[in-house]
Amino acid sequence: MPELSTLLGRANLRIHMIGIGGVGMAGLARLLEQRGHWVQGSEQSAGRLVDWLQAEGIEVHVGHDADLLDDELDLVIRTTAVPLDHPECKRASEMGLPLYRRGEVFPAFLRAFKAIAVTGTHGKTTTTAMIVHLLRNCGIKTGYFVGGESAQLGAIADIGDGEHMIVEADESDGTLVHYRPEIAVVTNIEFDHMEHFANEAEMLECFRQFLSGCAQVIYCRDDAQATQLCGPMVGALGYGFSEEAELRLDAYSPAGLGCRVTLEGEETSLPFAGRHNALNALAAIAIGRAFECGRGMEVFSGFEPVDRRFQVVARTEKVTVVSDYAHHPTEIRATLDIARGLGARRIIGIFQPHRYSRTQLLGPLFPPAFEGLDHLVLCPVYAASEQPVAGGTHRDMGRMLIQHGQTACTLVEGLDEAWEQALRELDGEGLLLILGAGDVDDLVTEAIRTFS
């Protein structure tokens, strides 16, 4: 079987992708197709990204079927969520076809480019999109992959001019260790993805191995673990509010759904809120300077956030509905910080926990993260292929919230019930947050129907 990077160096490969409808797989599919390869894939159900791939000319079969594989294929790629005993994986093995995870193929694909990889527990998607936005404004047409949908970018991935590639590098399944970028951006490091990492030490080792293969590192000096791992590296550049940062923001102040920041004596108003987003923008500035693109924060005055990053999806005179991907306690706190600054009469949240493992192991961190909500509607856990574990259900989280005593909470058994309960709590006025990384975003359709 040929080595993966050698295989990807060939022209006109025939590739089958199992689970092609996820954002990571869909983005890779488009890049491979733009590189001149023939790509097809399978997905359990239709969706926006399946529709997008089909519009791009990539054949997607809804439903899995081992008969989709034939001996003319050169490569089979699976998403990590697809196990090796999946019928299509078993057929690939029986036929002797090269079978790899997406997180192994993508880093090998990037060896043909000058890659800039953005990683970290939080903020990867927004930071990557900001870097692409900044470089576009400097007339630099880099390729990119962004792990979220963005109307402004127009696609989750694009091959660009074929020289540089700005990518979001995911640590969730440990395949981060395969990346060898020219520049790495590390936004922050916090324990997560308990479904893969046995403990925090194992996760940190994954980041260490990744960093050992990076030619240059840009990291957030405000984050303790990023600083501990990246700070000692030769030539590492730290950014942040910290006085020790080489690239430093002097001031930040919220302004409704926006903010004001001061960089090197220049104050700029920006159309997004949150100190975390100001830091993400600063990371993009650092990359811009590496490209000799000396733009200041004003370049982000026209930036449109990626979908589900404090995205206002519906609004009337009295009600605002926001959809946000937040599913980790740190992300929830950041979202609530912005929400509290909007001055709403009431703030109601619908939250769908993501994975039983995360709900169990980070359980005590969730109740304080929700402080500031007037009422929380708590949905069942979005399993993401996991089996329930003791202490990891939404009922377990509900008990912790009651014990914490800071947030009124109603447990529901489905999204329809969650929507009805949230409307009762909202009572015609206030801010409604739809939070989580699973299918809770389906409620956006109800929000638009009700409030637009």
Image (tube, helix red, strand yellow):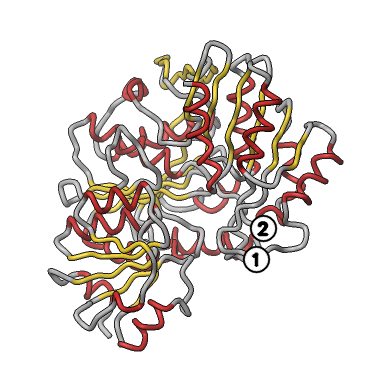
Instruction: Name the disc covering residue 115, or none.
Output: none
Q: Which residue is mark 1?
A: 387
Q: Is residue 271 above or below residue 132?
A: above
Q: Which one is nearer the viewer's eye here, 335 or 185?
A: 335
Q: Amino acid at mark 2?
A: Tyr
Residue drawn at the location 40% of the way across and 44% of the way down = 148
Q: Element under label 2?
A: helix
* Residue 358, picture quadrant: bottom right
From the top left corner, tell me how far across and down residue 374 is, in percent: 73, 25
Q: Is residue 7 above or below residue 435?
A: below
Q: Is residue 255 rendered to the left or right of residue 146?
A: right
Which of the marked residues, 1 or 2, is nearer the chain's N terminus?
Answer: 2
Disc 1 marks a residue whose amino acid type is Gln
Comparing 4 with 344, the one in front is 344
The residue pinned by badge 2 equals 356
380 or 274, which lies in front? Answer: 380
Q: Residues within 10 Å of mark 2 (few under 14, many from 20)?
A: many
In three-dimensional space, the C-alpha distance between marks 1 and 2, rounded to whole angstroms, equals 7 Å
Residue 140 falls left or right of residue 265: left
Q: Residue at x 36, y 32 (%)?
A: 285
